[in-house]
Image (cartoon, grey):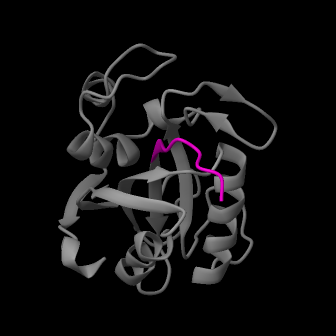
């Protein structure tokens, strides 16, 4: 087995259908061995965004070390969404689980399947709020601002603290 250097990957999780906490918990539990999670933010409840006639979301950000290349990791994450129970829906529609790659080290990538860093993360308080809990000084490689600075520029009104996820549940 060839040994790739590990990369730090940061993922945003969202769920607004079914047992939302269980859906979030299933992700870090399913990532090993190819990705080992080392940080999980608290969970926030947020009003739906885009399409608003749907239940509130639970959002969380997790960080891990991976040996997979970005597109290989993306394929695994999409497969994992389906395993947890995601079915096709429309953009910004309700979903059992949503896993978005926010950062892969400080890689800047624009491809048809994946843009890194995530192209809309700097507008989204529901991503920046939990991200600031685990990586406030992380600097966005395109915008050259820290997560803390990006969060200060967004409206956090619809984002409410929901729960600490006990690390021992992983």
Q: Name which residue lies at 54% across and 71% down.
A: 97
Residue 55 higher or lower than 127, as above or below: below
Q: Residue at x 22, y 71 (%)?
A: 165
Magenta residues span 1-9
> Which residue occupies 32% across, 44% down?
131
The x and y percentages for residue 45 are 31, 63
Image quadrant assignment for residue 41 = bottom left
Give 61 or 37, whichever is nearer the viewer: 37
Q: Where does the image place residue 110, in percent across and percent down from the top left?
A: 72, 28
Q: Position of residue 108 (x, y in %)?
A: 61, 24
> Residue 40, image x and y in percent?
29, 59
Between 29 and 54, the residue placed more toward the observer is 29
Task: Judge whether residue 48 can be spotted in this image.
Answer: yes
Quarter containing the C terminus: bottom left
Picture quadrant where residue 89 is located: bottom right
Q: Is residue 61 above or below residue 140?
A: below
């Amino acid at each position: 087995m060839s040994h790739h250097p590990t990369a730090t990957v940061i993922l945003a999780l969202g769920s607004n259908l079914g047992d939302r906490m269980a859906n979030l918990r299933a992700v870090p539990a399913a990532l090993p061995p190819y990705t080992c999670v080392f940080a999980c933010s608290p969970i926030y409840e947020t009003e739906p965004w885009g399409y608003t006639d749907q239940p509130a979301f639970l959002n969380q950000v997790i960080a891990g070390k991976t040996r997979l290349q970005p597109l290989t990791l993306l394929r695994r994450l999409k497969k994992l969404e389906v395993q947890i129970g995601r079915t096709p829906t429309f953009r910004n529609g309700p979903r059992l689980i949503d896993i978005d790659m926010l950062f892969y080290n400080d890689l800047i990538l624009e491809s048809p399947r994946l843009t890194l860093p995530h192209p809309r993360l700097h507008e989204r308080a529901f991503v920046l709020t939990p991200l600031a809990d685990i990586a406030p000084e992380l600097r966005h490689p395109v915008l050259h601002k820290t997560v803390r600075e990006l969060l200060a520029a967004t409206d956090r009104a619809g984002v409410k603290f929901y729960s600490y996820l006990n690390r021992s549940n992983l």
